[in-house]
Amino acid sequence: MKKMMMLAAFAMLTVGCEKKPEAVQAQHTAVKTQEVKARAQADQLTEKEIQDLESLEKSPNEETASLAGYYLSNLEVTPVQEMREFIAKGWDEWETLNRQEAENADQAESAQGDASMQYRIEIKNQVFGGKHVVETAYLHLISLSDSITLDRVVVNRGNCKADYRDGANPILYGQSVRFFLNCDPRNVREVVAVLKDGREIVMSPQ
């Protein structure tokens, strides 16, 4: 009986020894498979990176857009690391450009807020030939900013003509330019100054 138990134990030990190398071999195979998959992924762009290249093909920077198009056409022959470095650089450039555009827009908005003017209408009665009294109306545009470069003035949305008479342009703070009004000054309802940079200032009377 003791002999049979020893034989059984020996058999179990032998089977265990035979299975152990197989388990180790299977584990090594799984590790190698994972390594191969990892190398394969490292050797090709991800779907997200390809989408990034397609987006950079629409970059406002012509050189970046052209290079992105080249990489998309040569995915199989271009080093992956080179394309990944390009993608990172392209997004940095685009973010910088967007930030600069936002800053420029903020500056333009700030400058527009600083431009301010008022208007005043002056009416003069002139006597001609000792009998005829002629009423003449002048529109004065007064700057409330350090310097304003005027392009034109629009009165009553263009329904009242205003002809330039005198005054320096750009208009410095407190200075004015004068226009001759070719309409009844009592009917003036809106005066808009259009500046050289395209901004419009709707003025209030002084």
Image (spheres, rainbow, N blue to C red):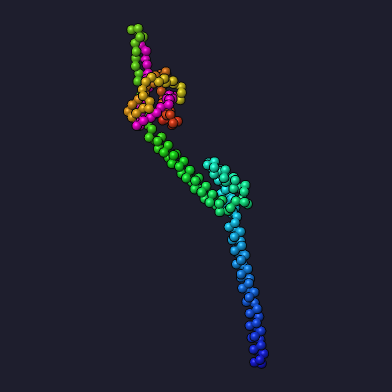
Question: Does the magenta portion include 78?
Answer: no
The residue drawn where x is 40% and y is 20% is 164
Q: In which quarter of the image is the C terminus?
A: top left
The residue drawn where x is 59% and y is 63% is 35
Residue 88 point in image, percent of width and height: 52, 50
- Left or right of 188? Residue 22 is right
Front residue of this view, candidates 190 and 51: 51
Picture layout, residue 85 above or below residue 20: above
Q: Is residue 52 visible?
A: yes
Front residue of this view, candidates 107 and 182: 107
Front residue of this view, candidates 77 and 119: 77
- Our reading of the magenta stretch's main secondary structure is strand
**Quarter location, residue 119:** top left
- Left or right of 80? Residue 114 is left
Picture layout, residue 11 above or below residue 89: below
Residue 76 point in image, percent of width and height: 63, 52
Q: State which region is magenta.
A: 133-156
Residue 124 point in image, percent of width and height: 34, 16
The residue drawn where x is 57% and y is 48% is 53
Question: Does the magenta portion include 135?
Answer: yes
